Image (cartoon, rainbow, N blue to C red):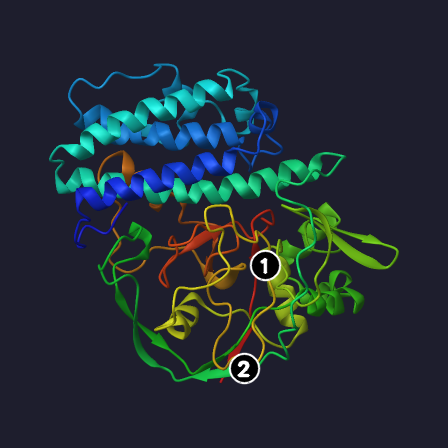
């Protein structure tokens, strides 16, 4: 839920944002066939058709039905089909079986979106209350999250196809200059403030802003590269139990991990499945599709550690929210090498979500919102680790220095990577 202390965006501004975000989702889905958009490749992923319908269901259920007099529900069965985890709203299709929703057809889902969009335009043209505007803004940010998930889930789906189809033009990207040797940059300790300050949109888990004690630390000026990860592999990193957390070692033994997700070795060279199809691994680009367990093991191998989320947020203060993002799906859609020779921290935003060593727990004073939207983040605050910074699949404008992404420590299908830290 949004931070209740912030100022609400005006309705005309939200109407423009609504049109833009909804258009971006349709653009992302445009290259997909009905079959592409229906199949579910694993329990953690959802079909593209489900993503498109679920975000629309959110606007219909949370915004339009309670707040637009005379609103006509598009299809009563959609509440069961496209609810995600909102227990207070009703029963739903089990997550692992979302791929069984072969009907409705993709065209009917697109018609559903058009129906809801017309009603939302009517609502925004009136005089909606600040609470309604907050819900709409939350819905737009929620849809941007699903835009990223749509891309990562399509990548996983296409990786299972023996043809390894490309979502985007498979022409290899230009080779960039290498990022140079990573440097460790120092930061002082002391009492610091972290968390969202109430200026603009934020999810509830980003606040309240609070004080934290920080010891002096150093953090790498760029992310770990594929080339550095290959050194870890060649040095037996996946075979040394002393580097791994106990659950991590059990996981790699059970799953047979020997490299990042989507990697395969061909004649001594590593290739990886990408949204542009199978491509040679770029040694200078940030490593991605690694779990928390792998990130932690690499840090141990390198004689460093992962940063805490407090350290990461402190280091990112004052940096421009610029980087390699999805740009409405028109971007690179792959991590790229850090810009060489530039002083200060690089790649703090975009390219890869960066694992921190911090568990996803509530900040001091956190209280979930009342009602169904209170189920948005608070119920997930156990057994997961925080990632920061966004990725090459994150929509432009969706990220903040206080943004807390979170996943279980074994997950690898997201664009997740790492940078190193150490005590000063």
Residue 71 location, x and y as percent?
Answer: 22, 19
Q: Residues within 10 Å of mark 1 (few under 14, many from 20)?
A: many
| Quadrant of residue 240 within the rendered picture | bottom right
Secondary structure beneath dot 1 equals loop
SS at badge 2: strand
- Residue closest to the eye, 178 or 233: 178
Residue at left 40%, top 49%? 381
User: What residue did someone put label 1 on?
Assistant: 335
For marks 2 and 1 on the same chain, the one whose residue lies earlier in the sequence: 2
Please state which of residues 121 and 232 is positioned toward the viewer in this rendering. Answer: 121
> Given the current orientation, which residue lies at the most extreme right position?
267
Q: Nearer the viewer, mark 2 or mark 1?
A: 1
Residue shown at the point (14%, 36%) measured from the top left:
128
Q: Quadrant of the N terminus?
A: top left
* Residue 343 located left or right of residue 196: right
Q: How many marks?
A: 2
Q: Which residue is mark 2?
A: 184
Quick check: can you spot residue 92?
no
Q: Which quadrant of the view contains residue 260?
A: bottom right
Q: Residue 320 falls in which quadrant of the image?
A: bottom left
Q: Nearer the viewer, residue 133 or 339?
A: 339
In the rendered view, tell whether residue 12 sits above or below residue 236: above
Residue at image position (26%, 48%) is 2
Q: Position of residue 292 (x, y in %)?
A: 57, 57
């Amino acid at each position: 839920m949004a931070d209740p202390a912030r100022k609400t965006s005006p309705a005309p501004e939200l109407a423009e944002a609504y049109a833009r975000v909804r258009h971006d989702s349709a653009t992302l889905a445009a290259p997909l066939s009905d079959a592409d958009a229906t199949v579910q490749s694993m329990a953690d992923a959802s079909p593209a058709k489900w993503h498109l319908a679920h975000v629309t269901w959110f606007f219909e259920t949370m915004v339009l039905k309670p707040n637009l007099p005379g609103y006509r529900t598009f299809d009563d069965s959609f509440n069961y089909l496209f609810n995600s985890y909102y227990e207070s709203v009703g029963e739903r299709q089990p997550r692992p079986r979302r791929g069984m929703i072969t009907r409705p057809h993709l065209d009917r889902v697109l018609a559903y979106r058009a129906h809801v969009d017309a009603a939302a335009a009517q609502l925004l043209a009136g005089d909606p209350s600040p609470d309604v505007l907050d819900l709409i803004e939350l819905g737009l940010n929620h849809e941007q999250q699903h835009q990223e998930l749509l891309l990562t889930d399509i990548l996983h789906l296409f990786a299972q196809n023996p043809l390894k189809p490309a979502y985007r033009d498979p022409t290899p990207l230009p080779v960039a200059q290498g990022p140079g040797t990573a440097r460790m940059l120092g930061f002082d300790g002391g009492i610091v403030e972290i968390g969202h300050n109430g200026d603009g949109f934020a999810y509830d888990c980003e606040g309240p802003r609070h004080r934290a004690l920080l010891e002096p630390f150093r953090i790498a000026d760029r992310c770990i590269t594929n080339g550095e990860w290959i050194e870890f592999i060649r040095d037996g990193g996946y075979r040394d139990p002393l580097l791994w957390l106990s659950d991590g070692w059990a996981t790699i033994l059970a799953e047979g991990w020997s490299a990042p997700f989507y990697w395969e070795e061909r004649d001594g060279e590593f290739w990886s499945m990408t949204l542009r199809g199978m491509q040679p691994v770029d040694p200078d680009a940030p490593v991605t599709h690694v779990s928390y367990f792998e990130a932690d093991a690499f840090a141990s191998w390198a004689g460093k550690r992962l940063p805490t989320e407090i350290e990461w947020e402190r280091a990112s203060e004052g940096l421009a929210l610029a980087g390699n993002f999805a740009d409405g799906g028109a971007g690179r859609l792959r991590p790229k090498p850090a810009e060489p020779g530039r002083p200060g921290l690089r790649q703090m935003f975009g390219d890869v979500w960066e694992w921190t060593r911090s568990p996803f727990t509530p900040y001091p004073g956190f209280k979930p919102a009342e009602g169904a939207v209170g189920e948005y983040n608070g119920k997930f605050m156990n057994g997961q680790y925080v990632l920061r910074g966004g990725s090459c699949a994150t929509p432009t404008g969706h990220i903040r220095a206080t943004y807390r992404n979170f996943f279980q420590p074994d997950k690898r299908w997201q664009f997740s990577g790492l940078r190193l830290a150490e005590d000063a």
